[in-house]
Image (cartoon, rainbow, N blue to C red):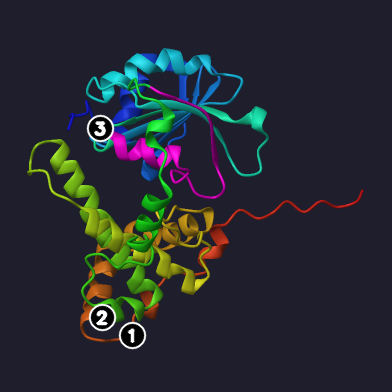
Amino acid sequence: MAKTLISTSSELDELLKKKYGERLNTHPFAALMGRVEGTLDSKEISITFSGDEYLLISTASSTKEVLDELLPVLTEVMGGVNPICSYDLQRSGDKEKDAMPTIEWDVVAPENRIKEIVNGRAFSNGAKVLNLKLYNGKEVSDYLESEQEKEDRIKNARIYGIDPGSIKDVERINNLSEVDLYFAIDAMGGHIWRCRHDMAHGRIPEIDLTEEQYALEYMVYQTTKFGVELPAPEIDKHITATPSYNAWYKFYSSHFKDVLTDEQWNAFQQAQRNGQDTSAFMPSGHWTDLLEKPIQKTLK
């Protein structure tokens, strides 16, 4: 497996800023979600990045040329490994002419990723891949799944959001309170991030985090019990974050990590351990307060 030049989206954001200076304008909080989003010379760019794993960059249909400039830079970021493919990504509800030109790298399992793309399993929410071009010298037809392969895959499928992965006590997770579920998600997400970060920097040997990822997405899907809107689990699809989930997670994360003082946090933990009332340490309002409100049009 190739080693990428950097390991996090924050580092990628900084690298691009150093190279392009004022030509680049990125959203400051996108890196928290594993992304670099903004514009280069006023041309839209959206990069999804996971160090030593994959990188995907898209732009608007009218600004495809920006990908040509970024191609050699991002290839270097990905350890000198060339992209696996390019295509136009048509999101659900968009017209075909608005499909986003996209280039994708995968340094872990490129053949598996290409097979996902070719057989329509790469994206959820009704997104379509158009004008697919492979960069490995093979034909798209080489990756088409036979009916028998499809039947076998469905029969033996593990589904993100349904399969609990490394969770040993599923019943306990299923019965967690909303706040305790947030802490469980935050702990597992932090564990996965630290392991990947340490592997990328050679601090620990390569380890398989598949079971932990299943566990994380199982817990994330449990948030639907509290009103969070998430796409239904599907074979070969990860549970993808939605504005609803992001609002839910931010509501608790901001409170416990930014609002509570160290003294209050310690008191909260002590009360939890002693089985005491913790309501005084809970956030005020409701997580839905963070959702964007629809604009109300009124007659003049």
* Residue 271 horizontal/vertical position (percent): 25, 80
Q: Are marks 2 and 1 in contact (CB under 8 Å)?
A: yes
Secondary structure of the residue carrying tag 3 is loop
As measured in the structure, the alpha-carbon distance from the residue carrying label 2 to the one carrying label 3 is 46 Å
- Gap between marks 2 and 1 measured at Cα: 7 Å
The answer to whether the residues at label 2 and label 3 have Cβ atoms under 8 Å apart is no
Q: Give the labeled residue for mark 1.
A: 277
Disc 3 designates what residue? 107
Q: Is residue 178 left or right of residue 295?
A: left
Type of amino acid under label 2: Ala
Instruction: Answer with mark 2 or mark 3, whichever residue precedes in sequence.
Output: 3
The stretch drawn in magenta includes residue 217: no
Amino acid type at circle 3 is Val
Marked residue nearer the N-terminal end (2 or 1): 2
Tell which tag, 2 or 3, sits nearer the viewer: 3
Q: Quadrant of residue 21?
A: top left
The x and y percentages for residue 185 are 32, 63
Residue at the spot 54% in from the left edge and 50% down from the top edge? 125
Residue name at image x 68 percent, y 35 percent: 95
| Residue 289, above or below 236 | below
Among numbered discs 3 and 1, the one appearing first in the sequence: 3
Q: Which mark is residue 271?
A: 2
Q: Residue 164 shows which numbered tag?
A: none
